[in-house]
Amino acid sequence: MSRDSILLLGESGVGKTHFGAQLLRRLMKGDGHLRMSGQATNLEPFESALESLNEGKAAGHTATSTYMDSVWPVADVAGHQAELVWPDYGGEQIKSMISSRRVPNAWQSRVRQAPAWLLLIRLQQTRFGEDIFSRPLGDLRGAAIENRELQISDQARLIELLQMLIFVGGAATGRQADRPRLGVLLTCWDELDFDGTPAAALEERLPMLAAFVRSTWYAPSIMGLSALGRPLSPHDKDSDYVSRGPEHFGYVVKPDGLHSSDLTLPIQMLLDGLR
Ligand SMILES: Nc1nc2c(ncn2[C@@H]2O[C@H](COP(=O)(O)OP(=O)(O)OP(=O)(O)O)[C@@H](O)[C@H]2O)c(=O)[nH]1
Ligand SMILES: [Mg+2]
């Protein structure tokens, strides 16, 4: 059995914990492409999220310093086995790596050991940079200059992160084929109100990042995800959720733009690429 750890990369609030909880439930139910094929360990990070979802409520934020790997033995419909190492952590750890330009030792070994990276981006949470990448120069002329706070744009930050990790992983000078597989998952798709494909959404909202990903990876998989299917509140319960069960909510948007209720697809695609 191969130990396929997937390095899940996502800043705070992108939906790592809710996706983990929903994915775990689907793997246990076993009606998707991937199913749990043995005893999963270290489920604590997801337990309270699972409970909240059962009550039709959203779960809380993960403490900044938390880092925990859950180990999930999975099998696909063809019988291929893999051991998925699925982390949960406070997303500020990612932010501080970018701002301090330092990758702590623990993260360095995670980066080196993972044959596949899954980058979670919540487009609604990224600021639209007003620059020549998003607007023609003519429009920018006369734009307010009093608000001159120097801040690197969100897409530049994400590119910075990927470049740092490629460097730390030792694949900076190697061939594209030596790099880890990359999956990009556009989370909270339900709040986007976008009709096209996930790749088109990335292209439209974060064109510079999209160009970087396209030129750095041979075949990145770009998908959309709504782990919850709809917004939930941490305080008021959604009774529809409770009566139908959280496993009936949530979907992924495949590269061709079609929806599927199989939340294991993004993982299946990454694992397939490793074989
Ligand atoms: N609308 C919608 N909201 C979602 C979805 N998934 C998560 N959320 C909301 O997004 C917020 C953040 O989700 P989390 O899973 O806690 O995010 P995280 O990446 O674990 O964040 P940290 O623990 O801070 O690193 C929560 O308020 C969720 O309710 C979704 O599919 N759709
Ligand atoms: Mg979390």
Image (spheres, rainbow, N blue to C red):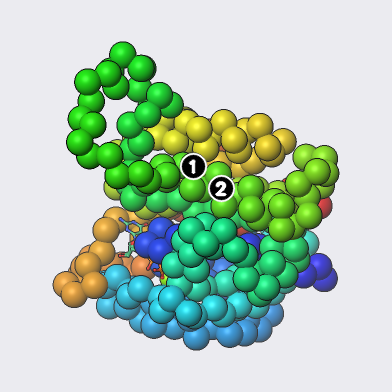
Q: Whole-percent x and y of residue 270? A: 67, 52
Determine which quarter of the picture holds residue 97: bottom right
Looking at the rendered structure, the secondary structure element under dot 1 is helix
Q: Whole-percent x and y of residue 55? A: 27, 78
Q: Residue at x 48, y 64 (%)?
A: 96
Q: Mark 2 points at which residue?
A: 160
Pick the residue in front: 202 or 108: 108
Q: In this view, does 227 lie to the left or right of 24?
A: left
Q: Are the residues tagged 1 and 2 within 8 Å (C-beta)? A: yes
Cβ of mark 2 under 8 Å from ligand 1: the answer is no
Pick the residue in front: 100 or 1: 100
Neighbourhood count class around disc 1 (C-alpha, 10 Å): few under 14, some 14–19, many 20 upward: some
Q: Whole-percent x and y of residue 255? A: 54, 37
Instruction: State the count of labels.
Output: 2
Residue 106, disc = none
Q: Name the residue under label 1.
A: 156
Q: Which amino acid does label 2 sit on?
A: Glu
Q: Is residue 21 left or right of residue 268?
A: left
Q: What residue type is labelled 1?
A: Ala
Q: Is residue 28 left or right of residue 167?
A: left
Q: Which residue is drawn at 62% across and 84% down?
A: 41
